[in-house]
Amino acid sequence: PMKTGKHGAKMTASGHEPGADFEDAGGRAGRLKWLIIFGFCTGFAFFNAANAYLSFFSQGLGPSWWLILTWQLLNMYSWGLLAPLVLWLARRLPLAREDWGRALLAHVLASLAFAAFHTTLYAGITFVLDPFPHGRPLTFGEIFFTRVRIWLHVELLGYWAILSINYAFDYYY
């Protein structure tokens, strides 16, 4: 029979609970996981900021690089703040042979909930900063529903990226 850890979660092949290294942030693997998540968020923020800046600039809209960068860093770091909850779910619902269907369904539903929550955070950040160099400020609703319509798939990928980083570390460490 498969061993279980202190939370009743199944143990990985390396003999620890999935996501356990995140609880022990002082450990080498835990620090490395957080550095990878931080690096991913920072890199993606710079990529998105450059893309938005060049898009606005090419339209002759004179954007502020620092405002756009701040907007994107806050957007991506908010995923970093959600990461502990994603990792808690990874530990509670491991994608293992036993019960993988139930765990997968739970993660799909959780990714939808996290995407909705993060989209709300994004809309709030965007509403407050108003980084778009145009005449009329957008309403919170316009920002939220535009984000859902155009970027929902990216929001969903945020959850799965964090989950994947966690499982990769559980496998290799």
Image: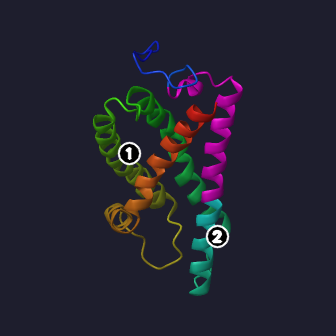
Distance in Å between CA atoms under marks 2 and 1 = 25 Å
Q: Secondary structure at mark 2?
A: helix
Q: Is residue 124 visible?
A: no
Q: Quadrant of the N terminus?
A: top left
Task: Name the N-terminal-most of marks 2 and 1.
Answer: 2
Position in image of residue 110 (x %, y %): 34, 41
Q: Identify the colour scheme used.
A: rainbow
Q: Is residue 1 shown above or below 162? A: above
Q: Is residue 99 magenta?
A: no
The prevailing secondary structure element of the residues shown in magenta is helix
Circle 1: element type: helix
Give the percent coordinates (x, y) of residue 85: 44, 33
Q: Position of residue 66 (x, y in %)?
A: 67, 64
- Residue at the outermost right position: 28
Q: Quadrant of residue 34?
A: top right
| Residue carrying label 1 | 114
**Where on the picture, by quarter, is residue 148?**
bottom left
Q: Nearer the viewer, residue 98 or 75?
A: 98
97 versus 153 height, above or below? above
User: Residue 112 or 14: which is nearer the viewer?
Assistant: 14
Query: Which residue bears the numbered disc 2?
Result: 50
Q: Which region of the structure is painted magenta? A: 18-44
Q: Position of residue 79 (x, y in %)?
A: 51, 46
Side of 124 relative to 77 (left or right): left
